Image (cartoon, rainbow, N blue to C red):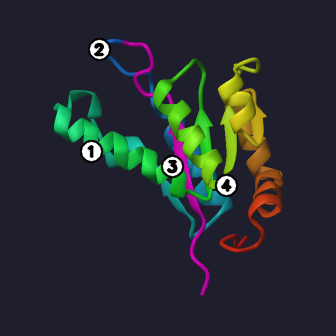
């Protein structure tokens, strides 16, 4: 019996905002697209797992941070939404890339080396990601990098 495909939704949360978070609606949209295209897959969303994390004390925040970095490196596929630079997402991208995961980055930061060189695919925006998933190109890319192991489509 093969294991389910594991997705990790990475992306900007706080970014450079000192006391606030960026809107997180993109996470629900990406999760719905993935669950529809890959029934039975595990879709991990850090904001669901660690709600209100900006309010955590140091001990809880540190534990959450290191757990997320670890999980990013254990995902089969990491989808990163990066409309502007995000230090946490950069580390998640590194961990996933280093572990051999299939990495898709949604960003207009086409000159950013972290986004360019740690991603298997860069897409400019969420509509492009939706088309990439619905067209079957994501499944094809995953198979090309990971083989048929965890992928059951």
Please identify the quarter of the rendering in which residue 4 is found: bottom right
Is 50 on the left or on the right of 17, as rendered?
Answer: left
- Which disc number belongs to residue 19? 2
Is 3 on the left or on the right of 14, as rendered?
Answer: right
Return the disc, 4 or 3, that comes first in the chain's sequence. 3
Return the disc, 4 or 2, that comes first in the chain's sequence. 2
Alpha carbon distance from label 3 to label 1: 14 Å
Q: Name the residue under label 4.
A: 100
Return the disc, 4 or 1, that comes first in the chain's sequence. 1
Range shown magenta: 1-17
Label 1 element class: helix
Alpha carbon distance from label 3 to label 2: 25 Å
- Which disc number belongs to residue 63? 1
Is disc 3 in contact with disc 1, using a CB cutoff of under 8 Å? Answer: no
| Image quarter of the N terminus | bottom right
Alpha carbon distance from label 4 to label 2: 34 Å
Q: Which callout, 3 or 2, points to the residue nearer the camera? A: 3
Q: Is residue 110 above or below residue 150?
A: above
Based on the picture, tell me whether residue 12 belongs to the magenta stretch: yes
Q: Where is residue 51 in the image (x, y as percent from the top left)?
A: 29, 40
Q: Which callout, 4 or 2, points to the residue nearer the camera? A: 4
């Amino acid at each position: 019996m093969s294991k389910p495909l594991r997705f990790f939704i990475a992306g900007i949360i706080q970014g450079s905002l000192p006391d606030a978070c960026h809107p997180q609606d993109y996470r629900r949209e990406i999760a719905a697209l993935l669950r529809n295209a890959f029934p039975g897959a595990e879709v991990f969303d850090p904001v669901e797992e660690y709600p209100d994390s900006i309010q955590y004390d140091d001990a809880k925040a540190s534990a959450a941070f290191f757990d997320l970095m670890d999980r990013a490196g254990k995902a089969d596929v990491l989808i990163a939404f990066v409309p502007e630079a995000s230090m946490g997402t950069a580390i998640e991208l590194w961990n996933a890339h280093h572990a051999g995961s299939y990495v898709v980055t949604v960003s207009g930061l086409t000159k950013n080396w972290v986004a360019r060189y740690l991603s298997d695919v860069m897409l400019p925006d969420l509509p492009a990601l939706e088309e990439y998933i619905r067209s079957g190109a994501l499944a094809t890319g995953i198979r090309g990098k990971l083989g048929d192991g965890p992928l059951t489509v």
